[in-house]
Amino acid sequence: QQQVKQSPQSLIVQKGGISIINCAYENTAFDYFPWYQQFPGKGPALLIAIRPDVSEKKEGRFTISFNKSAKQFSLHIMDSQPGDSATYFCAALKNYGGSQGNLIFGKGTKLSVKP
Amino acid sequence: GAVVSQHPSRVICKSGTSVKIECRSLDFQATTMFWYRQFPKQSLMLMATSNEGSKATYEQGVEKDKFLINHASLTLSTLTVTSAHPEDSSFYICSARSRDSGSYNEQFFGPGTRLTVL
């Protein structure tokens, strides 16, 4: 049973456009939702994260929108640049702040930004 | 800050040999370290979770006798792939969870180790 569903699998966006990646989760016990960026041959790097007590978080060109009732969250990349081309993973964690809990990852979205 | 290193970055070995991969948290103490495996164009698959000084907890389907994990200190964990076979070829990534209350539960990932078994 896949606990975090991510879409689309791949995405092509023109430079300057908006990239949108969506994730849906099933377990209402999740209380921390990070997004990771991974370049080929590298480990994932935390991009931005949100807790369910807010509906939106913005950091530079990256915004997370969170809909608790729909159990969905999305990553928006504004003014997308070729350097943003990477694979993006959403994830979810329960028991944030506790000593237990493992990240549950989505399957990833390969973003290609065309110049 | 919050840097996690892995060594080696790449390793090629012959079938039947054992390979050790090190994961270090360079500027923080880690309560827990995680080992993941990633196949091409796929997501990260959690293999095991380890806490300093205690036995690792392996995910279902992961052979603990084949993938030996030692978490000797708050800054070092090692993964040893014993009697490696070509099907063990993969990208292995570790992550470490900080003890720092300001970033509690945030996981910092290493750069990964590409293992190729001939």
Image (cartoon, coloured by chain):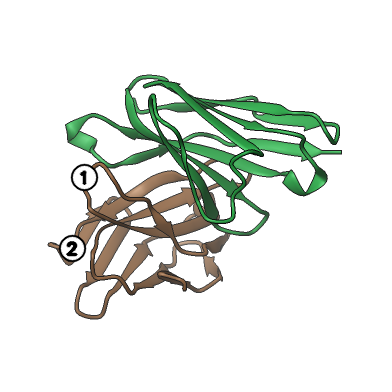
Chain colours: A brown, B green
Q: Are marks 1 and 2 on the same chain?
A: yes
* In contact (CB < 8 Å): disc 1 and disc 2: no
Q: Closest to the observer: A77 or B16?
A: B16
Residue type for callout 1: Gly
B95 above or below A26? Answer: above
Chain identity of mark 1: A
Residue A42, visible in the rendered structure? no
Left or right? Give the position of A110 relative to A35. right
Residue at the image position 53 percent from the left and 53 percent from the top = B44
Q: CA distance from mark 1 to mark 2?
A: 16 Å
Q: Which residue does the numbered mark 1 point to in the structure image?
A: A98
Tag 1, which secondary structure?
loop
Residue at figure coordinates x 23%, y 65% from the top left? A29
Q: Using the image as rendered, state which of residue B111 and residue B84 is in the foreground.
A: B84
User: At 77% across and 49% down in the image, what residue appears?
Assistant: B87
- Which of the image's four quarters has the C terminus of chain A? bottom right
Left or right of residue B55, residue B61 in this image? right
B86, B24: nearer the viewer: B86
Could you tell me which chain the residue with mark 2 belongs to?
Answer: A
Label 2: few (<14), some (14–19) or many (≥20) C-alpha neighbours in 10 Å: some
Instruction: Say which residue label 2 marks.
Output: A52
Q: Where residue B118 sits: x, y (%)?
A: 87, 38
| Residue A41, horizontal then vertical, whole percent | 63, 42
Q: Amino acid at mark 2?
A: Pro
Left or right for B42, reference B86: left
**Neighbourhood count class around disc 1 (C-alpha, 10 Å): few under 14, some 14–19, many 20 upward:** few
Picture layout, residue B76 above or below residue B50: above
Residue A14: image x %, image y %? 53, 67
In the figure, is residue B65 to the left or right of B117? left
Residue A45 visible to the viewer: yes
Task: Pinpoint residue B63: horizontal percent, then vertical percent.
Answer: 62, 46
